[in-house]
């Protein structure tokens, strides 16, 4: 199984991870450096540094990969055999090339030097007269710095391509495709059972051939790398990386194969891919198990020693957040723009669930008869609310709560949910005035007022306003006739007569505190009420 990376990204990825080579330095100094004998093979050898020495045997001071510059003091007066021995020592030490300044020690190349270099495959470079060796070193340092900058930029671009692959619909396969193109290798991803789950770049080895390498990888612990070599084309160098959980449990392996060893920059790109794959596999394994662990802990172990800690750990894994961080309950109802029957049919449940899981970054989502409910770590920012409303949802967002407060938070959000369709907009618990009138909202409150005060609405306007104002004043004064009389500027008996008339019209007992409370709430929703 393998995914496919975008063609544009794949072509960009083929731009060089190669090391700085001898031919690139020669191209920078064509007047100062002349290639006398070339290297063996088609590709120029890598060049890691420029060194200067006049020792007869400088190999103990070399690391390999150098352009060794000399004025030829070790070769002065030497026989061709001694010159050949000098060249052999340099070649055995891994020197990339020998650079000879032809003055002031030598007027021409020493006898036998060019044939010896050609025999050992050691490039020979003539340094032009009056060219200081330090000029060559400085030019090399400048080229090396430019190369390092280019490589750093390439690494950043490669990391971005891999991160974009992780966000695709098939993250593991897409990531392998990008990685294989970046490091010019084939790549295989296996599970803990050794079965190939994704691959890219035409792997040269099958599951059975990879099994011994996997056994070595799984035999150790922590970060480790196993390297092997196979006779199959494209498998001269095979590198295996373990993919592990936070508790060092084997989740799988990443195996890459190439015709030659990877460069340090390529190893860096592989390390980034290993980290991304571990995150993906940890989320897929631990995340999928988290809801079942949470349910088990709640049903069986919450009262046991350490049970609450197990619940908190499973909750954190389920809502993609750190342990102990508050969560909130969110409920959603279908808005006017949400078409189709609800709840969805069984085949359509999964896409809805996955979409809501992604939006709220949680696995604790349930589809309900009214819409959905979720427990999430997300504060549900404004942009997410806008996204949900554009998808046809109206949501009620609860306050942050600890585990012990989730049930109360759910009840609070349920009270908000009943106002969503009437108000036509999403609500946050923090923004709602927590009173009976606030929870009713203007639409529901108006319905209550219309029902309770309907007989008064049938009266002429002047009479209706007089009775409503008297009733409101009397209720505000807690039934005190004198206080209401003074506030309205009416005689005490007039106030009493108006209030008794209201009670008769409405058919209620104003001595009942519950009746007075309902009327006081209903009056808040009468148009023009203060």
Image: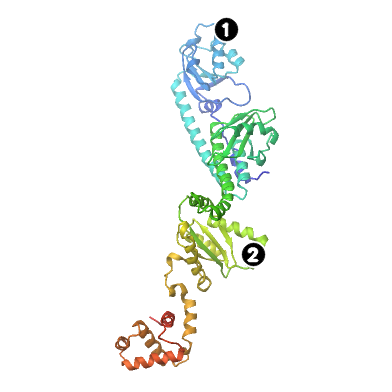
Foreground mark, 2 or 1? 2
- Please say if the residues under marks 2 and 1 sit with CB atoms less than 8 Å apart: no
Reply above or below: 366 against 438.
Answer: above
Q: In which quadrant of the rendered view does residue 474 lie?
A: bottom left
Looking at the image, residue 415 lies above or below residue 524:
above
Report how far apart the C-alphas of labels 2 and 1 lie in the structure.
89 Å
Packing grade of label 2 (10 A; few <14, some 14-19, many >=20) is some
307 with respect to 115 (left or right): left
Q: Which residue is mark 1?
A: 81
Q: Which mark is residue 73?
A: none
Q: Residues within 10 Å of mark 1 (few under 14, many from 20)?
A: few
Query: On the image, which quarter does residue 11 sit in?
Result: top right
Q: Position of residue 393 (x, y in %)?
A: 55, 65
| Residue for badge 2 | 344
Give the percent coordinates (x, y) of residue 412: 47, 66
Quadrant in which residue 227 is drawn: top right
Q: Position of residue 122 (x, y in %)?
A: 57, 18
- The image shows residue 156, relative to residue 407, as above or below, that is above
């Amino acid at each position: 199984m393998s995914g496919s990376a975008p063609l544009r990204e794949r072509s960009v990825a083929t731009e060089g991870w190669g090391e700085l080579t001898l031919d690139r330095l020669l191209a920078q100094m064509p007047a100062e450096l002349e290639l006398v004998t070339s290297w063996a093979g088609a590709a120029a050898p890598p060049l890691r540094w420029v060194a200067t020495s006049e020792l007869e045997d400088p190999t103990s001071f070399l690391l390999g990969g150098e352009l060794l510059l000399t004025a030829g003091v070790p070769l002065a007066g030497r026989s061709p055999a001694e010159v050949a021995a000098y060249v052999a020592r340099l070649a055995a030490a891994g020197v990339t090339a020998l650079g000879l300044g032809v003055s002031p020690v030598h007027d021409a190349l020493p006898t036998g030097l060019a044939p010896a270099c050609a025999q050992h495959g050691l490039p020979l470079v003539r340094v032009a007269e009056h060219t200081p060796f330090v000029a060559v070193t400085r030019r090399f340092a400048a080229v090396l710095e430019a190369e390092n900058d280019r490589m750093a930029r390439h690494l950043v671009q490669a990391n971005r391509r891999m991160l974009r692959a992780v966000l695709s619909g098939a993250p593991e396969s897409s990531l392998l495709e990008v990685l294989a193109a970046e490091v010019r290798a084939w790549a295989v991803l296996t599970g803990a059972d050794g079965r190939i789950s994704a691959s890219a770049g035409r792997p040269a080895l099958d599951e059975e051939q990879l099994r011994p390498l996997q056994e070595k990888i799984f035999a150790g612990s922590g970060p480790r790398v196993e390297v092997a070599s196979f006779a199959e084309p494209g498998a001269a160098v095979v590198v295996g990386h373990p993919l592990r959980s936070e508790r060092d449990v084997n989740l799988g392996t990443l195996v890459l194969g190439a015709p030659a060893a990877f460069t340090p920059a390529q190893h860096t790109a592989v390390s980034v891919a290993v980290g991304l794959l571990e995150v993906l596999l940890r989320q897929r394994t631990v995340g999928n198990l988290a809801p079942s662990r949470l349910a088990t802990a709640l049903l069986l172990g919450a009262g046991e020693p350490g049970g609450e800690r197990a619940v908190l750990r499973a909750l954190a894994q389920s809502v993609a957040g750190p342990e102990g961080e508050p969560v909130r309950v969110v409920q959603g109802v279908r808005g006017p723009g949400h078409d189709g029957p609800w709840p969805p049919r069984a085949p359509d449940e999964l896409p809805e669930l996955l979409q809501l899981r992604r939006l709220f970054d949680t696995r604790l989502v349930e589809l309900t008869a009214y819409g959905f409910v979720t427990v999430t770590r997300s504060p549900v920012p404004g942009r997410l609310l806008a996204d949900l409303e554009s998808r046809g949802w109206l949501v009620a967002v609860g306050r942050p709560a600890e585990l012990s407060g989730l049930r109360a938070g759910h009840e609070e959000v349920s009270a908000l949910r009943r106002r969503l369709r009437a108000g036509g907009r999403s609500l946050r618990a923090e923004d709602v005035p927590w009173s009976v009138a606030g929870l009713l909202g203007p639409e529901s409150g108006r319905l209550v007022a219309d029902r309770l005060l309907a007989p008064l609405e049938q009266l002429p306007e002047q009479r209706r306003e007089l009775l409503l104002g008297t009733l409101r004043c009397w209720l505000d004064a807690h039934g005190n006739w004198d206080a209401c009389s003074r506030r309205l500027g009416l005689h005490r008996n007039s106030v009493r007569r108006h209030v008794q008339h209201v009670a008769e019209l409405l058919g209620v007992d104003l001595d009942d505190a519950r009746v007075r409370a309902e009327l006081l709430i209903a009056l808040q929703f009468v148009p023009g009420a203060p």
